[in-house]
Image: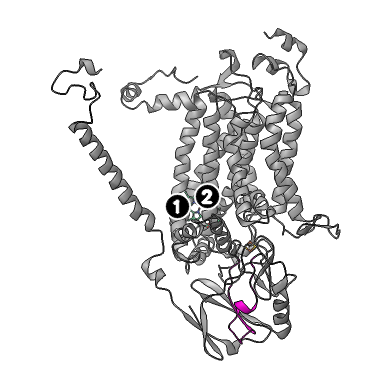
Amino acid sequence: MSDTVVGANPDPHASGDDPNRRDFIHIAAGAAAVGAVVGLAWPLIDQMNPAGDTLALSSIEVDLSKVVQGQQIVVKWRGKPLFVRYRTPKEIAEAVAGDHADLRDPQTDEARHKPGKPEWLILVGVCTHLGCVPNFGLGEYGGWLCPCHGSVYDTSGRIRKGPAPKNLAVPTYNFVSDTKIKVG
Amino acid sequence: MSGHSTYEPKTGFERWLDVRLPIIRMTYDTALNFPTPKNLNYWWTFGGILALCLGIQIVTGVILAMHYVPQVDMAFNSVERIMRDVNYGWLIRYMHANGASMFFIAVYIHMFRGLYYGSYKAPREVLWILGCIIYLLMMATAFMGYVLPWGQMSFHGAVVITNLLGALPVVGNAITTWLWGGFAVDDPTLNRFFSLHYLLPFVIAGVVALHIWALHVPGNNNPTGVNVKSEADTVPFHPYYTVKDGFAISVFLLMFGVFVFWMPNALGHTDNYIPANPLVTPQHIVPEWYFLPFYAILRAVPNKLGGVLLMFGAIAVLFVLPWIDTSKVRSMRYRPTIRLYFFIFILTCLVLGFCGAHEPADKVIPGVTTFTLGDYDLNTMVWLSRIAALYYFAYFLVITPLVGLTETPLPVPDSISEPVLSHPASGPIGTAAASKKG
Ligand code: HEM
Ligand code: FES
């Protein structure tokens, strides 16, 4: 084709030359267009990430005096359930005994509660498999049983059986008084 | 088959339009005069049924959207209002909810038809892949639609399915947070799911157009799998198949009507009439029936990422099937060996669905305890789904390529017209056909 073209623009590569001015304009325009599209795509994607007000996370206080020993209460924290479990000595003993079992996500019971407060277990009530809320007191370890795909947690909230990979998460919290904790 | 048009504009207006927008010509060529193999059986009527299903979902869906409120505090109540107060709201919602199930029944039959008659083989690979894409889009649409009424199953189903992506290494958590628009399934999630649930059916309609385009280039496959050789092998689509499809659609609508009017909640789950509560997961959580086989595959693997990969793999394998299958004979009508494996494959899919509806530790044979193999007793749904999942993949990855290489197919007729005159389903067609070849 190029040999039929007449005018001021001979084939730029005929002699194997470096890119000429016209090539430069093509490359620059193309690069600018790609840059613009990528730059515009990012806002379109990022708008789906948590918005400012969603990110302004709150912390909550939980009154422990409402919990009966051997029971748990469930409160909502950042849209998720939070387990506050008041363990019996037997449950604590079972959890400690479990320290030496063959654990998938090895952790001692000690590391999962505040020092000197083994009776209080505070956990994010979200199964580490696919996010269901495990049911209290069920399963062969007396901890929790997830109704979705059968993950079994012990009385320390550690994964013992089933598809979940990790122990139930312990959130950041501290005791404000003997009967009150602040989570988050 | 495509390319030549026999349309002749009759009126002055048609002639005027034909040189400006030949839309009547296109309709005539694709929907009326399209030459179609004369031996298509009722398994071929599901394409038309599927088109109807999409139409029903779009019409009822647009109407539901006029009354539905995508907001966590109001979504459940707005659906109840549709059911109780909106004029004929109950009818429209039941049509939409059951319509989704009917859509999946039809698409599964349509897909098994394609598998049996080898409709995915050359030159129909692109047609098959477009179909697989439609199926994926349907699953995404139905999943997001099921979240909208914001019942217990809606909510916890959404939690489980979005968490699947969290299994991906490194990027998993960022992706789930991005999908949710927060740190849990919540209002932003519901809003975007509504937006996408409205959008995707129209994307499906677009891919359907490509699907039909890709169909009309090589033309329909047929029960013999033999190419159309001459005009004698075909009949015009209208009136032959418009009438046949019309009859099948009528029967299908009767069944649809039975569900809508007499058992509208049979395919749903009672827990979805309980408003969503993020703090309590229902005792027994199951997806809609059309996802059960994949759900069983997911749970068969005692490893999160492994289960997710295998589940997606179960669909991914469909995309590459045209290149896995080594057999040159299209229709299983002439492949007795693979036919047996294929029927076991259908059974396997049903077994997987059955397992998906039960809890992993449930006994298959009630009351019998055998011995524990690995993590569960052998007589449990988990082990049954493991065996079934193994067969599912073996069918595609081992049996399909091996049987294609080793089997001896029955003699394939020379043309479509031959077995129409002496139906081979009642016995292999004589050696005459074989010796006539070559
Ligand atoms: C491929 C087509 C479609 C499928 C498979 C589908 C599927 C579903 C499903 C399974 C539900 C849940 C029904 C229930 O249990 O209540 C649903 C709800 C809904 N869909 Fe669709 N849908 C489709 C198209 C559409 C379209 C095009 C729209 C709007 C333009 C729409 C609007 C809605 C609305 C507003 C709801 C919530 C009301 C309700 O739950 O009944 N759908 N859809
Ligand atoms: S979500 Fe808990 S086991 Fe799957």
The residue that appears at 34% across and 27% down in the rendered structure is B21
**Badge number at residue B115:** none
Query: Which SS class for mark 1?
Result: helix
* Location of residue A15 with respect to B69 vertically, above or below: above
Q: Nearer the viewer, residue B59 or B334?
A: B334
The part of the image, by quadrant, that contains residue B243 is top right
Q: Earlier in the sequence, mark 1 or mark 2?
A: 2
Query: Which SS class for mark 2?
Result: helix
Between the C-alphas of marks 1 and 2, the distance is 9 Å
Q: Chain of mark 2?
A: B
What amino acid type is highlighted by mark number 2?
Ala
Location of residue B112 in the rendering, given as x and y in whole percent from the top left corner: 65, 36
Location of residue B256 in the rendering, given as x and y in whole percent from the top left corner: 62, 46
Q: Quadrant of the C terminus of chain B?
A: top right
Q: Main secondary structure of the magenta part?
A: loop
Residue for badge 1: B196
Location of residue A162 in the rendering, given as x and y in whole percent from the top left corner: 69, 62
